Amino acid sequence: MILSKIKKQLLVVDDTKITVEILQRNLEMQGYKVFTAQNVSEALSILEINKIDLVITDYKMPKVSGIDLIKHVRENHKNTEVVMITGYASIEGAVEAIKAGAEEYLAKPFTDEELFKAVKTALDKTNIHQAWQKSMQNKHKEMHGIIGTSEAMQKVFNEIKKAASTSATVLITGESGTGKELVARAVHYSSKQASAPFVPVNCGGIPEGLQESELFGYVKGAFTGAAETRAGFFLTADGGTIFLDEISNTSLSMQAKLLRVLQNKEIYMVGSTRPQKVNIRIIAATNKDLLMLVKKGVFREDLYYRLFVIAIDIPPLRERDSDILLLTHHFTTKFADEFNKSKPQMSNNTLQVLSNYNWPGNVRELENVIQRLVAMMEEGSIEAADLPSMMRFSAFRKTGVNRTLAEVEAEHIRNVLSAYNGNKTKTAELLGIDRKTLREKLNRYSLTDIDKT
């Protein structure tokens, strides 16, 4: 949920003085700044000269009622929410209040917990609306395509700047979909070597038997089919940066060769007995815990410490929730332009769902969701019902502790698989299992209907 660090300003309106005093005291103890009024006329004067985030008003008051105050707020103060309280609770009154524009309706007597919950619910919607308006009006703070104003991302930006000022090896860590290659590119293109090559290599996408020839190249006649000498990725990146993504997927023998490159700044092409010097910066990335792999004996400890000179850890999207709407606005604009469509509007309910979702696939999942929404959009605003089913509330979906372990596991697999558009390789990678195990679980939980690749 998007939370504001600025103290929220509330206006309590009730013709009973003791009620006003109690509400003011309780809400101020929660950290809110509270204005008070005992009639609608006083309330309007306060609204004219103060930025009020939330009005809490009584239903029945002399001369002008709380319903009229709600209508006034709705038509004159678009960023102000309203909570209605009343000692004359009725279905008709609740319906009238909601129709007039009240966000919450509380019947007296109510507990402090009920009051605080109603206030928080209303303010959360205000925060989301204001964040969305700000994302549309302000230029995004970004660094080489990385967008974020959250404290966590400001830390990443600072680390990128520090890394760019040196030629030291960098290790980037973070969950799948957080943008590790973007960070690697930002380090390279912020450095003095920005005009030199940046060569990205997906180590997980190269079969073990081809890793050496792909990375270091080979000379003519080195093996059957080597009809000519071919430079590998390291020689291609000479003078610049090589980005070794998914470094944990390299074999132990390949890790020994990488260690030699880091130590001696030289490579051996396959089939050659003469080393070749390379002036190159290595940036590696992983979504795995390398220290844990070291303990298991599947990753070299000496290579780990050679890589771990400058470390940049990218936070998952769920830990930078204030960036969700910024990224939503960015991707909405991007894909509207790409598909030659008018930029869609987002309903408040849609923004609320996007803000509350856990995003297991991180920024990549958010980008995929927005791309799908814009591509399929026809006319009007995007509603919560347009979002993928696993993101929406369902009265039939079991929640809480009354679920078996199998039900929890099946739901998580379904969510991750959907986040990656049915890609089993990426899903297995994020879940920390191999494709065979994932396939068995898909069959066990009858999830093959969303299995695509």
Image (cartoon, helix red, strand yellow):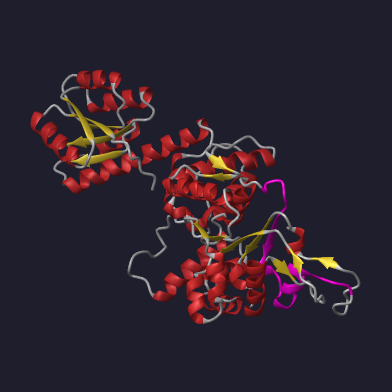
User: Is residue 392 among what the camera can see?
Assistant: no
Q: Vertical placement of 426 versus 35: above or below?
A: below
Taking 93 as reference, is 19 left or right?
A: left
Residue 63 as seen in the image, left or right of residue 336: left
The residue located at (61%, 45%) in the rendering is 190
Residue 389: x %, y % from top left: 51, 56
Residue 335 covered by magenta stretch: no
Image position, residue 240 (x, y; %):
70, 54
| Residue at the spot 77% in from the left edge and 65% down from the top edge | 232
Q: Quadrant of residue 168?
A: bottom right
Q: Is residue 198 magenta?
A: yes
Q: Residue at x 32, y 68 (%)?
A: 401
Which residue, as the protein is rendered here, is positioned at the far right?
227
Q: Magenta residues, as a range? A: 193-220
Position in image of residue 248 (x %, y %): 58, 71
From where the camera sits, is residue 264 visible?
yes
Residue 363 versus residue 72: which sits nearer the camera? Answer: 363
Residue beneath the point at 36% across and 27% down:
74
- List the single residue furthest toward the left: 18
Residue closest to the eye, 48 or 304: 304
Q: Position of residue 379 (x, y in %)?
A: 60, 37
Left or right, 266 with respect to 309, comes to right
